[in-house]
Every structure is written in C-alpha cells, then in structure tokens.
Image (cartoon, grey):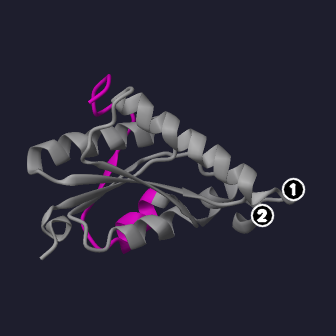
Amino acid sequence: MDSDTETPRVVVGVDGSDASQEALRWAAHHAQLTGAVVEAVCAWDTPSEIGWAGPATEAGFDLERARRRFGEGISAVFGEVKPAEVRELLVRGDPSEVLVRASEGAELLVVGNRGRGGFARAMLGSVSQRCAQHAACPVVVIRAGTSGPGPV
C-alpha cells in the first residue's frame, strides 16, 4: 500500500482571504497534532463562468491572479518556508464543487466562514454552507480571528 494512502489528509480551502488564512492556520495545527498532511486547495474561475456581468476576460489573467492570491495566502500563514507536509493544489472550477470533490477520502475539510466570493456566489449560497452539506468528510468552518496570530 502507498504511504500517501495511509497518511490522514486534511483539505483546506485557501482563497487569500483573512478567513481562509485562519482556516489554513487551524488545519496546519490540527495536522501537526494528528500526523496528517495538509492539502491546501485554491479554486479559480473566470468571472463569465460564474455569472458575473462584464466583458470576457482571458483565462490566463485569472489563473495568474489566482496563483498570486494563493501564494500570498500560503506565505501569510507560513512565512518564507512552507512545511513539507503542506501540498498546494490550484484547481479551475467552482470553489464549493472543487472542495467537495477534494474532500473524498479526506479526514477533514476546513474552510473559512467568509471568502472572496462575489455577489453571484452570495445569491447561490456560501461555499462553507455548500461544503458542510455535501462534503464526503466532517467539515470545520473557521471564523476569522479564532486561530491565533502569526505563522504556524
């Protein structure tokens, strides 16, 4: 059996928001206590794909913006040196769908209570609510300001 399949996995949604940084900090601390790996997942979409009005944008621009925001969120929590047990996944798609898929086989899914979603997502329901309803594992929703200050 592969050693990765034996290691517990904690999935955490990271979008660069303060709440997602709190969620990542909490997930990393939980993983240290349980011997799990952290799978930090950032989902990105182009605005036209999620129902925003406006001119079409280039997907490469949105990908670069998501990649930068993801990196900034990871650095804000861990500083210059990311722990080896933290894996980063940048996935194109609706955040709640991406996180629900990532929750399959995970010990835990951790999300912040507020992210960077726009008006369209607010009308459809929050990512944390959709994850809590549909994830394949237990879900922890972290409120901003609850995991403690500073890098892990």
Q: Residue at x 20, y 39 (%)?
A: 29
Q: Which residue is mark 1?
A: 54
77 or 54: nearer the viewer: 77
Q: Is residue 85 magenta?
A: no
- Residue 127, percent across and down? 49, 59
Q: Please state the extent of the stretch shown in magenta in the rendering.
A: 128-152
Q: Which mark is residue 39?
A: none
Q: Is residue 149 above or below residue 121?
A: above
Measured as percent of width and height from the top left, residue 40 is found at 38, 51
**Left or right: 45 as drawn, with respect to 35:** right
Report which quarter residue 19 is drawn in: top left
x and y, in percent, of residue 49 in the image:
72, 67
Disc 1 is placed on an element classified as: loop
The reply to whether callout 1 and callout 2 are in contact (CB within 8 Å) is: yes
Residue 27 percent coordinates (x, y): 26, 46
Which quadrant is the N terminus positioned in? bottom left
Q: In this picture, is 5 found above or below 70?
A: below
Q: Nearer the viewer, residue 142 or 34?
A: 34
Q: Residues within 10 Å of mark 1 (few under 14, many from 20)?
A: few
Q: Amino acid at mark 2?
A: Ser
Give the residue at x 71% y 60%.
46
Q: Which residue is mark 2?
A: 48
- Direction from residue 98 to residue 44 in the image, left or right: right
Q: CA distance from mark 1 to mark 2?
A: 8 Å
Which badge, 1 or 2, is on the more N-terminal residue?
Answer: 2
Who is closer to the viewer here, 146 or 14?
14
Other-residue count near label 2 (Cα within 10 Å), few / some / many at <14 / 14–19 / ≥20: few
Work out whether residue 17 can be spotted: no
